[in-house]
Image (tube, rainbow, N blue to C red):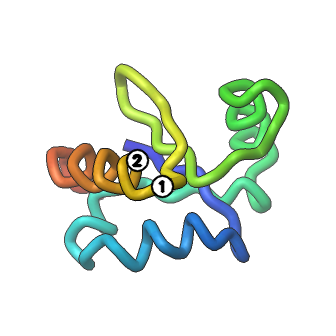
Amino acid sequence: MVVYWRPGCQYCARLIRELGTEERERVYWVNIWEDAGAADRVRHYHDGFETVPTVVTADDHFVAKDAESYDRAKAVIRRATPVD
């Protein structure tokens, strides 16, 4: 599981805060300001916009931006295998 994020993003910070340490370790975090390819992928997902945090699973991608999508992200992350 991958979560694309960027520094200064209030929605990213909220997602990180809402996850416990174990949950945060289940995710491969990619800073789109440090990885141009990642920024391109995020823009591809969102019609040219760098909308984050974008949660990407094997089957889907979505933006965590409100209570419902934060709950969805947390549920998906809890089921994920930890990243080594």
Q: Nearer the viewer, residue 66 or 32?
A: 66
Please tell me in which quadrant of the rendered image residue 21 appears: bottom left
Q: Secondary structure at mark 1?
A: loop
Question: Mark on residue 69?
Answer: 2
Q: Within 10 Å of the Cα at label 2, are there few (<14), some (14-19), or many (20+) other Cα atoms?
A: some
Q: Position of residue 45 (x, y in %)?
A: 66, 27
Q: Position of residue 5 (x, y in %)?
A: 61, 58
Point 25% across, 44% down: residue: 76
CB of mark 1 within 8 Å of CB of mark 2? yes
Q: Position of residue 68 (x, y in %)?
A: 36, 49
Point 81% across, 38% down: residue: 49
Question: Mark on residue 66?
Answer: 1
Q: Is residue 28 above or below residue 46?
A: below
Question: Mark on residue 18?
Answer: none
Please tell me in which quadrant of the rendered image residue 9 appears: bottom right
Quadrant where the C terminus sits is: bottom left
Q: Residue furthest top?
A: 59
Q: Position of residue 74 (x, y in %)?
A: 28, 55
Looking at numbered disc 1 in the image, what kind of residue is underneath it? Asp
Point 49% across, 36% down: residue: 62
